[in-house]
Amino acid sequence: MYKSRIKKTAGSLTVAVDSQNGELLSLVDESSGDNLIKNSSYTLPNPFALTIGGITLTAPSNTDIKKTPALQPEVREGASSITVVYPMLTDGVRFFDITVTVEIRCLPSSRLEFSIGVQNRSASRIDECRFPCVNGVFHGESYEDDTLVYPFNAGLKIRNPVAYLEKTPKKIYWRWQQYRYCYLVDGICTGANASGLYELNNLYSGPLSMPWIDYYSDNCGLYFGMNKTNGICSLSVSTFGKKSPGMNFSFVKKVETDGDFSMDGITLALHGGSWYEGADIYRASRPPLDPPRSRGWFGESIAVCAHYDFKYQNGGVVHTFADIPLLADTASEQGGDHLLISGWHTDGFDNGFPDYRPDPDLGSPDDLCSALDQAHARGVFVSFYINTRLCNRKFAHLQTLRDEGSAIRADGKPYDELYGDDTLAFNTMCASSEVWQQHLLDAIRYLVELGADGVYLDQLAMAAPRVCHDRRHGHGLYDWTSGYRKLLQEAGKLQTKAGRPLNIMIEGCSDLYGNLVDGQLVSTFSYYFSGAYPELYRYANPEQTLVDMVYPRRNNVMRPEHIGKRSTEMINRTYINNCYFWVYDLEEDNSFFNDPAQWKYLKSVLLLAKKVRPALEGFVFRDTNGIVSCDDGLAARLYENGEECVLLYASESDELKYVTLGFEAQITRAETLDGGEQATSFTGNKKTFLTLPPSRLGAIWLHK
């Protein structure tokens, strides 16, 4: 008997594909009868797309098959699987000797696992593979009450993404020294692409910190993730907007080869209406690659005072090495015990990369060594900035390094990048090039010999990975992230002069690197007004430490006014998320010392954090999972360790606040910002009702 579609069921999830051409037709939640695919646009590829020289190859249409029977795929049914084999592909004019095999396997707990294998016998180079193409999805009757969490950097949380991605954001332009910035406010996509789609599409592991998303409503959620790297891939979410609602999901592999390749381990799962369940699926399907690092002194530290003003890109010098003891004193006065020095090397920040030797304008190596000893005598640790990606083309003495270590494009040319001064050009260096790794490790070892306590490795987990075609490097096309992992593993073996493990912070965050480092800088200010949600990464990887920037309210010329206006909000969020504080001190450009009121507030928050953080050791970040309700104007986060839990909270006003927890517990300890009145509680109906004192910030310890 003829069947137009083939169905398979996994738990409460039924998938159906077209029996003629293998396209994905429906995803039905059997518990409600809801088909999540509400909008099957025929202009979008399904179930895969291969890009070759600007053209797209996908499953043949039924009309194509009728005209050319040789395009007919073989569709095979297993007991719990569907396999579709496409013997050849067409763009409607030409035929390509490419065989594509797509498999969908049904797993327990309402899960599907997708894989694709591509055999390319044509002479054409395949640029990208988009798979699986899950199109036109929303929950229930309306897309308007759906929410998307997407791991751009530490995370985005976007309510009604169909409408929000279509929304035109405000663009705030800002000039600081040689730099020209554009900040997006109240929106995130700046326009439709060539296909008419509003799309988020970020590479893993660069801007994309984890390979999964969750798309959920009150009663149902959809997890879409990948439990391996599959080379260099991005995670695409897109929509046509309100005019043709529905969300589209796919992974996009950078192929850039005329050979065979595959993608597998891609999971689609249904769950209840909370992204926390999606995070649990992610953690179960993708166990950590490394045990968490022992953070040493960094585990007890609460803030770094960042000085990018030793030597700026334009050559301006604000501080020399002789100033380091005084800067250590001011960091201590502020409440921290950690200095970060940038622009310390030849020709300064965003210029002298990677000539990592002390700049003579700032002092000698002996001067730097002596200054570090004096900082240590004051109980302050000192870290140094190193850029892990760039080599300035102006340095003739580094030509061999560029020739041997640059990342090379498919056309044989090096990738290049510009920052700030557009007369300066940098080669992008290959993360898996041994000569580049050794150059960076030599720089780190040199700093350790001088007395450094740590290094900050810029761009490592934030800038996009590159496919490198230089065969002399001895790596595969897609080994970028494994190269950085090797660098971090080797750097992690180093000891300081005092016999402590070298502290390592990196820019960005990534599940590929997080347990190899001590702190990950997430800079949520840069996308704070476009759905920034660091709680996503924090919840999914609670054993790791995120570092976030805070800014003064007044006299901050480094960042635009709309960021300064959220100063208190950003400080409070960093506190309740138990993140490490990154505090700039750039004299006239960006310093809390020029905003006395906020400096006083920051110092009081750091003093409270210093009391709270050690007591949170062993507690797991639960976000608001377990908090039933909070008053308006109150933000709270829950931490758990067996029968013990801690609530960190921040309020917009000095008034009594109320919180309800979804379990019964008794208060055992409390701390407030001003050390005044304490919280009270009563229990009933398996809940705890807390009355919080009129203090802006606090912490409450409870026993269940």
Image: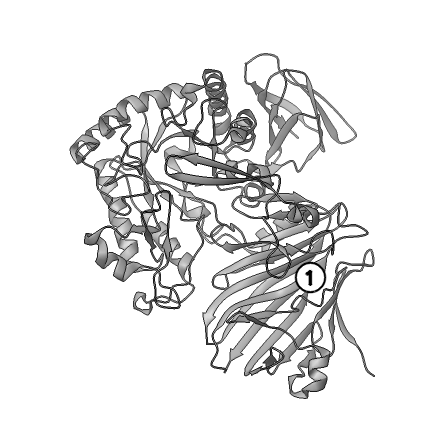
Residue 265: image x %, image y %? 57, 64
Residue 10: image x %, image y %? 73, 64
Q: From the viewer's perspective, is 630 left or right of 235?
A: right
Q: From the viewer's perspective, is 259 left or right of 251?
A: left
SS for callout 1: strand
Q: Nearer the viewer, residue 395 or 497?
A: 395
Please say if 638 is above or below 244.
Answer: above
Q: From the viewer's perspective, is 693 left or right of 501?
A: right
Please say if 673 is above or below 368.
Answer: above
Residue at point 50% right, 55% down? 204
Looking at the figure, which quarter contains the C terminus?
A: top right
Residue 378: image x %, image y %? 29, 22
Residue 26: image x %, image y %? 75, 65
Image-quadrant location for residue 356:
top left
Name the amino acid, label 1: Asn
Residue at point 27% right, 26% down? 324
Q: Nearer the viewer, residue 644 or 696?
A: 696
Label 1: how many Cα within 10 Å (few below 14, some 14–19, many 20+)? many
Looking at the figure, which quarter contains the N terminus?
A: bottom right
- Would residue 111 be visible to someone looking at this image? no
How many numbered circles are shown?
1
Q: From the viewer's perspective, is 148 left or right of 463?
A: right
- Would residue 590 be visible to someone looking at this image? yes
Image-quadrant location for residue 72:
bottom right
Please say if 555 is above or below 295.
Answer: above
Q: Nearer the viewer, residue 215 or 81?
A: 215
Please say if 64 is above or below 675.
Answer: below
| Residue tagged 1 | 135
